[in-house]
Amino acid sequence: MCGIFGFFSRSPVKPNRVFDCLRHRGPDDLGGVSISVRNNSIRHYTFEGSNFESQQTIYFSENTEIDPEVLFLGHRRLSIIDRTAAGHQPMALDGYCITFNGEIYNQLELREELEKEGIEFKGNSDTEVLLRSYIHYGEDCLHRFNGKWAFAIWDPKKKNLLLSRDRYGKKPLFYFFDGSHFAFASEIKALLLLPFVPKSPNLEQVKYFLTWRSWEHRHQTMFEGVQRVLPAHNLWFDPLQNNLEVRRYYSITPNLSLEPFSELKAKEYVEAGERLFLDAVRIRLKGGLPIGASFSGGVDSSGIVFARERLSEKETSLFIRPSTYTFSSVYETNELKKYDESKWIDFALEKSQAIGIKVEPRPERFIEEALKIAYHQDEPFDSTGIFAGWCVMSLARQHGVIVTLDGQGPDEALGGYPPHIPIGFSELLLNFKLIRFFQKLSNFSKIENFSFLNMLRTIFMGSLGREVRHRIYARQLGKLFKDGKIPDYEGGSLDARRFLNEKLKYDVEEGLPRLLRFVDRNAMAFSLEPRTP
């Protein structure tokens, strides 16, 4: 919903091209601050026509130059909450400065807590809530946030810059540090516009991607010297000491033991899951803008649409439009019919009050827009599946929607993918749970298109582990590499091959950020804010 960047350079830098590069992430406003890291003096920058004014405001031009050894923070704004000048960024309070991309969904509750502590607010933005939370609670404020974020905060007392990314990587954040220059940005292409950032491919990362088709769990990117701030990580940069420290602040700790089945426990888990899911949807319906929904007819998107309708019956303030507009990709032509999910989309729409709007992602459109998609994705994608999401976001924007609800994560968290099946069965066998093994096998036999032989094959192939299978497939690929070596896989753990809970942890922490990247880049290409309950 916004674009952020910043830098600390040993030489003068013109930021105008970076602002232009991030315009799609924030077309409504832009701003910047320069901070003298020694005496903490702050200068504000904006453009003519902005509704933000301060005594030290300087208007941008294409020749505006930021002095050496000054910390600069930049921001491009897509206005969602508090669209007045009080929500302008970067925001400065008592010497602290922030540039923030994301949304804190429980900002009203946090605001109330801080007001009880005697803290007064100037506006209604969640940016101010975030910054005042940091000033009051310090780094521990992150554990109070329900939301998504990538932000940078200048701390005048520590004389350090804090970069933080949300727990699961909904909002992107990249950085560059070579010992002399430091920079960060929402997108890699913005960093590459800075004069001190090299424009060279990272060949080791290219090899890794070609071998494993996975890279979101690595600090490295496809570009030499450009690193990603991983989900659930903080980065501290000290411009005076010229050093950098990265720390993890959150992690899932799964229980690897098999819990005996209990109907009472199962009921408790279902009720807790329902309560948490409804709350996740409810808290993302706040705000006065039209909210649409990406809709495939699957468990995640259907759950979101029906949860919204259920909530709107109880909380009329959430009923933003008479009906929810849903946006779906369908494949109606013969050659693409096998990918079509219209059956499930139409079935769900018949049961709901939603108004369904559909688009067909045609091959000729993909060819026409492929370079544009690649530009917005920044790094490679391993299938054309993201094209459907691209078309859906484009469709939503055409219908005047700025905020969408998007379902991501249920299959990762609940074991909905084929690779989960062999791990679950193997775990039962390893623990001699033979009765449950055959009960589960019997249940699977009732599934449409089930094949007993295919199930055994799936269990066997899954037991080999991802590493073994990929080494078999990648043997020929290794011949293409100059050194003939295949890079080792760095993600997950050996337990992910034997324990279902560990596999689910791996999928949430390492697989989900990949999907969230696709959602963010597709939505931001059309200046949309995606919310993923």
Image (cartoon, helix red, strand yellow):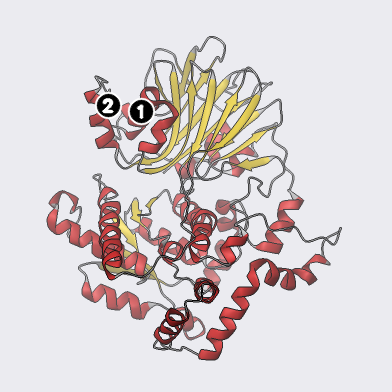
Q: Quadrant of residue 242?
A: top right
Horizontal side of 128 relative to 242 (left or right) equals left
Q: Are marks 2 and 1 in contact (CB under 8 Å)?
A: yes
Q: Quadrant of residue 182?
A: top right
Mark 2 Cα within 10 Å, few/some/many (few <14, many 20+)? some
Which circle's residue, 2 or 1, is located before the other in the chain?
A: 2
Q: Amino acid at mark 1?
A: Ser
Residue 244, image x and y in percent? 63, 29
Mark 1 Cα within 10 Å, few/some/many (few <14, many 20+)? many
Residue at (29% x, 49% y) in the render: 284
Residue 448, image x and y in percent? 41, 88
In the displayed structure, would residue 48 be above or below residue 103?
above
Would you name the residue on which mark 1 appears?
133
Horizontal side of 84 relative to 174 (left or right) equals left
In the displayed structure, would residue 28 be above or below residue 202?
above
Question: How far apart are the alpha carbons under marks 2 and 1?
Answer: 8 Å
Report whether residue 327 is seen. no
Callout 1: SS: helix
Horizontal side of 376 relative to 342 (left or right) equals right
Residue at (30% x, 35% y) in the render: 83
Quarter holding the C terminus is bottom left
Residue at (62% x, 78% y) in the render: 461
Would you name the residue on which mark 2 appears?
114
Q: Residue furthest right?
A: 483
Q: How many marks?
A: 2
Q: Nearer the viewer, residue 144 or 282?
A: 144
Residue at (52% x, 60% y) in the render: 502
Q: Amino acid at mark 2?
A: Leu
Callout 2: SS: helix
Q: Residue furthest top?
A: 39
Residue 243, image x and y in percent? 65, 25
